[in-house]
Image (cartoon, rainbow, N blue to C red):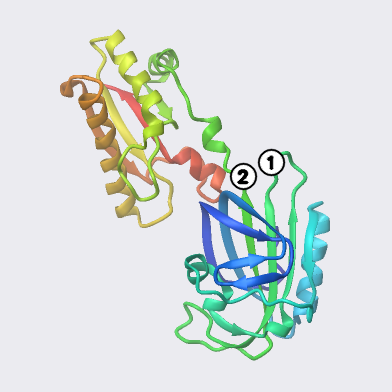
Amino acid sequence: MKRYEGSEIIGYRGPKFDEYLVPLGPPTSQDPPAYKKSVPLEGQVSYYTYLAPEGRTPTELFRNYKLEFQRLSLETLYEKGAGQPGWFGPTTTKIAKENDIGQIIFYNQDEERMLVGKTKDAQPTYYVVFVTAYRAGIVPDRLGTRVNKGRALAQIVVVAPDTLEKKMMFVNADDMKKALHDSGSVALYGVNFDTDKDVVKPESQPTLAEIAKLMKSDTSLRLHVVGHTDNQGKPDYNLDLSRRRAASVVAQLTGAYGIAANRLDAFGCGVYAPVASNEAEAGRAKNRRVELVRW
């Protein structure tokens, strides 16, 4: 979805697996958020907040986003115009504290407008467009810079289906053996961790069992276990996280599956060996991986 020409991004949270309650009707409660009609979703949720150029009204901004819905052939699920009943923010919930426009500014509730739509795919992506205007406030990361009353802004929330990693998940022992023979390494997407954690999740056990099966079928095989991350966060932190995750995999293989410790070692590359662009979630998902590399 394009931004309005000349807009400046003043708030952003990259895609993370999260919950989001998509409004399909006017609000009935602010804390916790509740609506006359809604749909709860899980997926890759991202937030983008834009400050429109001086002189642009919320009406103009909103109409342009409606044209953007048409360009993308989105199905419109809900529309709230200015002055219609209901007020969408701000709230005091955790998600609002991190991402809601109301945590950045005092805005004019009489100017708020909302547009909700989705793609026509079998697993659709949802778009929530919230347009309003400043009543008073400070632009983030501008050392207290204030903006003129009435300046229009928009927040876009995108909820995309989280299916990519599931599609890339399972590689069996024969697949690993072939990849190690052909290229000396194999990327695994079935060894998973919670965000910022280094403990292997229980759902990873089938892949770990296949690694153990591979190593028991070839007692001469020795492997480097290499952790990789995307670029979300500081490089030094991600480098340490990738090392800890690789060490956690080695500990599982030696402790739970009986593989000799002298046949494995752990190494972390962090953000420094991507296999795809980190600009979009599809690429970041490919970069979050564990690799086995033949000694």
x%, y% of residue 215? 29, 15
Is the Cβ of the residue at disc 1 closer than 8 Å to that at disc 2? yes
Disc 2 crowd, CA 10 A, few/some/many (<14, 14-19, 20+): some
Residue toward you, 113 or 71: 113
Count the marks: how many?
2
Choose top left, top right, bottom left or bottom right for residue 51: bottom right
> Looking at the picture, does residue 238 appear above or below residue 69?
above
Choose top left, top right, bottom left or bottom right for residue 38: bottom right
Residue hosting label 2: 161
Disc 1 crowd, CA 10 A, few/some/many (<14, 14-19, 20+): few
Q: Secondary structure beneath disc 1?
A: loop
Which residue corresponds to the image point at 30% horizontal and 18% vertical from the top-left? 212
Residue toward you, 40 or 8: 40
- Measured in 3D between alpha carbons, the distance from the residue under mark 1 to the one under mark 2, in whole angstroms, is 6 Å
Left/right of residue 217 with respect to residue 98 in the rendered view: left
x%, y% of residue 134? 64, 85
x%, y% of residue 61? 76, 74
